Image (cartoon, rainbow, N blue to C red):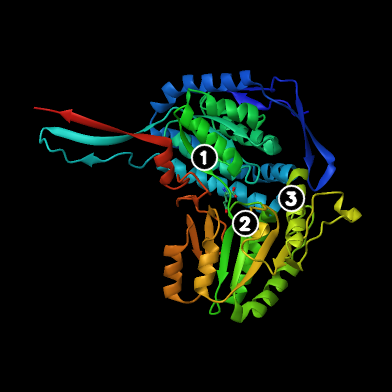
Amino acid sequence: MVNNLNYIGGRWSEGSTGNRYEHFNPANPSESLGFTEMSSLGDAEEAVKVANTAFADWKNRSSVERGEYLRKAADLLEANVEEIAACATKEMGKRIVEMRGEVLRAATILRYYAQEGTRKIGDVIPSSNPNNTLYTVREPLGVVAMITPWNFPVAIPVWKIAPALVYGNTVVWKPSQETAITAVKIAEIFEKAGLPKGVLNLVNGSGSLIGNAFVEHLDVKAVSFTGSNAVGKTIASKAVETGKKYQLELGGKNPLVVLKDADLDAAAKAAVEGCMKQSGQRCTATSRVFVEEAIYDAFMDKVLGFVQDIKVGDGIQEAITMGPVASKNQFETVTSYIKKGLEEGATLFYGGKTLDAPEYNGGYFIEPTIFENVTNDMTIAQEEIFGPVFVVIKVANYEEGLAQANDTIYGLSASLFTTDLNKAFHFAKNSEVGLVQINGETGGAEPQAPFGGMKESSSGTREQGTAAMEFFTAYKTVTITTK
Ligand code: UN1
């Protein structure tokens, strides 16, 4: 039993529904990590209430002071990196090496936003009346809700919470049930950093109950969500009904295009790592690779070299280079896509099997999987698989590669590997995504730069960098007339 699951108004408590949720290690599902008690609507209501009360004081503090809490939280995260990383690895399978990187990335994000507290929050604008001083100031929105996924259980909550707090909002946070225990550790970090009571409130529980309660609540002024397109659509319509701002970071089907003049080693490495990191469970993961005919065989040889080196197993061991997928549910989804690919006539270039030998302890392990003989209209080339699977498609030239790369409902990230400057710029301009990489892998984000997708990959809003200010604040325009 994991006690003290919720952090509401500076107090730790259990959820109050009496329903328990059992957590298992995806690398060894017979290992139970304990039960968490699910929260009730009353818990959600209480969290919004205390966040609303805390807002009056928090918004009137100096943003420099608010930033100091984030800086302390960054130091504490760093000091506890091993414990937090190991906890998340057990909960959702991301290998320990990547989890450490994620915790340190979260510390960097906190420091970036701590510094935001010292930057300008408005402009002085010329007025047509010489007696007027006309200026803008960015004001916080009030209580904002975060609904966060399991695939980045530390970095994504932090990249939403940090800007929300530094700009003066108070937060109610509902993380994925799959990573409830890691979320508790993150809330503890903010508590230890001395954040005033009620400024950050954690309510663990189901999306349909707690997430929904936050989205429908009239005292919640904005909701920031990362997750599936289906849930995102529901959140958007409820946010509109209840008059709140919303920010959705959804799926991707990210292409990587390789031209004949490219550095093939770098391109093959980026394709394999860009897909297989986190066992493919990143919305920015590479999932479609378009290769110019002329270098197809040479490129695939290099891909084989990299993919053969992947060592699948329990990511708590340092030597493992790919962990399990996060849950039984994920395992079933990914394997059903592999089956579908074969039914639709694609062929396996590599992998495709689940790993069932005794040493795998019944864990949710899937081989790194690469499909060939794929057309871009097949299900595996159109739907987000969110697993260690990518498809390779031959194209005649750059133009065909670009056209097919864009032929998707998604628009998160895209890569082009080339040494042709003209094509690089052309791709940067014409790729229908929010994140373009020339000679780099499709994943990755820096805290100081805007992050988000076009088309159905996002609500058009952006996270991180100064873009976060756009979302978490509203302009106030002030005119002062003097004699
Ligand atoms: C990254 O590529 O490192 O859920 C960040 C996701 C994205 C974040 C990806 N929102 O995978």
Circle 1: element type? helix
Estimate the x, y position of residue 227 in percent, counting from the top left: 60, 43
Residue, disc 3: 325
| Amino acid marked by disc 2 | Gln
Residue, disc 1: 160
* Rendering quarter of residue 272: bottom right
Inter-mark Cα distance, 3 to 1 = 25 Å
Q: Nearer the viewer, residue 232 or 161?
A: 232
* Rendering quarter of residue 327: top right
Estimate the x, y position of residue 6 in percent, counting from the top left: 64, 26
Residue 327 showing in the rendered view: no
Circle 3: element type? loop
Q: Residue at x 65, y 33 (%)?
A: 184
State the mark number for residue 382.
Answer: 2
* Mark toward the start of the polypeptide (3 vs 2): 3
Vertical position of residue 410 compared to residue 50: above or below: below
Inter-mark Cα distance, 3 to 2 = 20 Å
